Image (cartoon, helix red, strand yellow):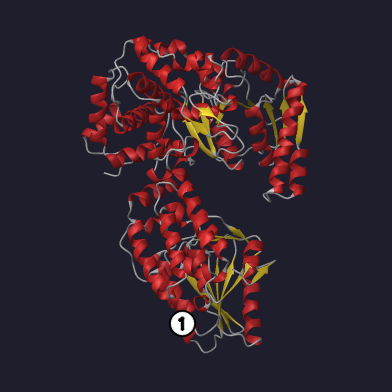
């Protein structure tokens, strides 16, 4: 089937792009569209052109699979230039989403008619590149500077109402956008309106204060990345350079960026998330989950409840403490009120969602729910008692899930009558904000149940990755190894601020000990106490966390933890903690030494990579992409480095294996035993992602 077809009606030629699933501007589309425009311009019967798309969306971007390959003519910018230079009016009919090259194509048309439900965006910076076909200089001529910079640098999408108000589109279609775009083209002809080339419009200038503010923001939000700063420079170039000069500058920097390590890592992250959430071996989800129960009105239970309400389910929130239940309801209502105030949802939506919430005091009230998620204290005995109650209350076909971050799902499943309907759903805190969801398959979970919880995860707009039973599953299991090395480094000579700074400079939003302070040292301490029997003698002997906890320093919430915090929670180094760390070394008889940032990074990262190899070998994660996705979306691994296993491939597995063997000799073989999979891959010249 041709990817572009044409149809003439009443002097208007509509070119219809049909390249499923998202009408990407592949080489075939570019060539056919260029030929279609040229044919329409040469046809005397055609007085105006409409560019539209089949399927559920307008062009939703370039063919990302072509990135990094030798470019094939015609380049999209050449196609768009041909459209813009046309002597007959060209109207874009936009529905679904017009993203990246699709938005650039629309801006190259002389007029734009947009479906009322459509959205526009330029997400290129999130892929380590810049809009390569004139997106920046054209948007700078259509919209105010603040709008252009927001769209380009943040990847923010403009809905139809915003696009019309910004002057980016000319009309909104309430019904069939193609028909209304054709009617708009005929009206242009009737009114004698000619072409209106975006390139010929004046640039909306950005003043020095705006530019300075934006630069400050991206220095914080895009730390370690190059593309946003290049995009800002291109916007500044629009202020004093001719359109064609900026286009040439754009193409030059695009060619440089598209092959950069940053762009390769970000493209990997993009595809990894899509791979990690696909489970082709599972059957199609069939259940219509409408009613849910959540056990526990704590912080996690509250967040899960909001997720379920957002997904359209009715939720019964259970807690035996009436005061806690009411406090949880008040917080949920306040959260939704805040979303209304920020313009994220309409007040009618807030009312509808809150109206689906019911507070109940007994698990026995969950007899009619389709799914129940337990979110009580992280204790095996407590959870088993809760599941015994749930099992007596719910239907045999109800899905039962545990939101545990460490406990054995198989053991928890022993207490239910239908273990095939039992799973783990590990949300990350705060559950209503964090996108990641580890769905855990127990040994007797049925494929249909797994399919249903994956579908529920997507319905909650999470990134659901299916993992196996393991101590800490995937993310926390790897984090536990990094945590261990961080404490060993303190004992051997580092200080908390040095470890944290090394991780921050690598690209993490914060280091190990700052993260502990944020989450609460009482949480970390309870986790340590629950796992003491699994720790080695050396791990138990390092009591820094115990000592700080005993001092009543619980982190940010008490104004002191590993660091001190002022009333605005600004962090400062505390000499008292430095002295406590030094005393730890003396107590265990470890001679302190100077430790380089390079060693800190290698030990914190390579120990996770080695554990990731074990996780793959054991089948706890099916694919390297699963591990990368979890760490990118739950633990702040810098996206521009692609995830821990992608990063390992870039460093080189032979080098990592050599350093692991070195640490086995210096730190201890019991902590640094190379994973057999890592050894096999390194010695055979292969990689985690099969790139070699």
Q: Would residue 587 be found to the left or right of residue 434 on screen?
A: left
Q: Quadrant of residue 204?
A: bottom right
What is the residue that sits farthest to the front in this orientation? 575
Q: Residue at x 49, y 33 (%)?
A: 466
Q: How crowded is the residue under tag 1: few (<14 C-alpha within 10 Å), some, or many (20+)?
A: some
Measured along the vertical axis of the image, is residue 362 above or below residue 616? above
Position of 166 with respect to 576 (left or right) is: right
Q: Tell me which residue sits at (59%, 68%) in the image.
A: 168
Residue depicted at 31% across the width and 14% down the height: 590
Residue 256 at x, y = what percent? 33, 59
- Residue bearing mark 1: 39
**Quarter of the image holding residue 502?**
top left
Q: Nearer the viewer, residue 280 or 618?
A: 618
Horizontal and vertical percent for residue 435?
55, 39
- Is residue 251 visible to us here? yes
Q: x, y (%) of residue 309?
A: 69, 38
Query: Which quarter of the rendering shows the C terminus?
Result: top left
Instruction: Classify residue 604 by image quadrant.
Output: top left
| Residue placed furthest toward the bottom | 44
Side of 196 where 226 appears, left or right: left
Image side of residue 387 versus residue 619, left or right: right
Residue 667's place in the image compared with 214, above or below, is above
């Amino acid at each position: 089937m041709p990817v572009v077809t044409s149809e003439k009606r009443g002097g208007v030629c509509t070119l219809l792009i049909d390249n499923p699933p998202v009408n990407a501007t592949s080489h075939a589309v570019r060539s056919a569209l260029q030929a279609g425009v040229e044919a329409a311009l040469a046809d005397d019967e055609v007085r105006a052109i409409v560019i539209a798309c089949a399927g559920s969306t307008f062009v939703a971007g370039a063919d990302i699979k072509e990135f990094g390959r030798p470019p094939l003519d015609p380049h999209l910018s050449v196609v768009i230039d041909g459209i813009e230079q046309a002597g007959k009016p060209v109207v874009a009919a936009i529905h679904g989403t017009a993203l990246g090259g699709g938005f650039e194509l629309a801006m190259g048309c002389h007029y734009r008619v947009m479906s009322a439900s459509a959205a526009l965006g330029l997400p290129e910076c999130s892929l380590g590149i810049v809009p390569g076909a004139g997106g920046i200089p054209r948007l700078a001529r259509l919209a105010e500077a603040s709008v252009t910079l927001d769209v380009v640098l943040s990847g923010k999408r403009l809905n139809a109402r915003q696009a019309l108000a910004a002057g980016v589109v000319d009309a909104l279609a309430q019904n069939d956008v193609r028909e209304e775009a054709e009617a708009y083209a005929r009206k242009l002809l009737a009114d004698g309106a000619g072409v209106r080339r975006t390139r010929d419009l004046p640039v909306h200038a950005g003043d020095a204060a705006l530019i300075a503010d934006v630069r400050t923001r991206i220095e914080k939000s895009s730390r370690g990345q190059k593309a946003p700063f290049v995009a800002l420079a291109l916007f500044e170039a629009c202020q004093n350079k001719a359109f064609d000069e900026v286009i040439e500058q754009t193409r030059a920097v695009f060619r440089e960026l598209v092959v950069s390590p940053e762009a390769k890592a970000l493209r990997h992250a993009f595809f990894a998330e899509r791979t990690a959430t696909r489970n082709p071996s599972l059957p199609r989800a069939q259940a219509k989950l409408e009613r849910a129960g959540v056990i526990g009105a704590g912080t996690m239970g509250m967040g899960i409840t909001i997720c379920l309400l957002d997904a359209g389910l009715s939720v019964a929130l259970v807690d035996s403490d009436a005061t806690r239940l009411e406090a949880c309801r008040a917080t949920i209502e306040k959260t939704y009120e805040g979303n209304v105030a920020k313009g994220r949802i309409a007040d009618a939506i807030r009312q509808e969602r809150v109206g689906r919430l019911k507070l109940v005091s007994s698990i026995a009230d969950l007899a009619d729910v389709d799914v129940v998620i337990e979110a009580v204290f992280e204790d095996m005995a407590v959870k088993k008692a809760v599941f015994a109650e749930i099992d007596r209350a719910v239907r045999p076909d109800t899905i039962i899930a545990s939101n545990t971050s460490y406990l054995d799902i198989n053991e928890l499943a022993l207490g239910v009558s239908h273990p095939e309907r039992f799973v783990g759903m590990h949300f990350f805190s705060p559950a209503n904000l964090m996108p990641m969801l580890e769905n855990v398959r127990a040994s007797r979970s049925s494929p249909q149940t797994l399919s249903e919880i994956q579908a529920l995860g997507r319905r909650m707009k999470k990134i659901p990755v299916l993992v196996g039973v393991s101590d800490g599953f995937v993310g926390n299991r790897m984090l536990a190894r990094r945590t261990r090395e961080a404490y060993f480094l303190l004992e051997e000579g580092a200080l908390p601020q040095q470890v944290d700074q090394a991780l921050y400079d690598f690209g993490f939003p914060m280091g190990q000990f700052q993260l502990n302070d944020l989450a609460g040292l009482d949480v970390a301490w309870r986790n340590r106490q629950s796992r003491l029997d699994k720790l080695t003698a050396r791990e138990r002997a390092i009591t820094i966390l115990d000592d700080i906890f005993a001092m009543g320093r619980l982190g940010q919430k008490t104004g002191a933890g590993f660091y001190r915090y002022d009333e605005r929670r600004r962090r400062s180094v505390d000499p008292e903690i430095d002295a406590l760390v030094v005393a730890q070394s003396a107590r265990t008889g470890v001679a302190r030494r100077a430790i380089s940032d390079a060693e800190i990074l290698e030990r914190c990262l390579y120990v996770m990579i080695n554990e990731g190899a074990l996780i793959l070998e054991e089948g706890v994660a099916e694919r390297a992409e699963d591990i990368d996705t979890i760490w990118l979306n739950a633990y702040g691994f810098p996206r521009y480095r692609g995830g821990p296993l992608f990063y390992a491939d870039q460093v080189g597995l032979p080098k990592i294996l050599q350093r692991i063997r070195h640490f086995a000799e210096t730190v201890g073989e019991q902590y640094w035993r190379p994973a057999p999979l890592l050894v096999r891959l390194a010695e055979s010249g292969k990689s985690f992602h099969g790139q070699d």
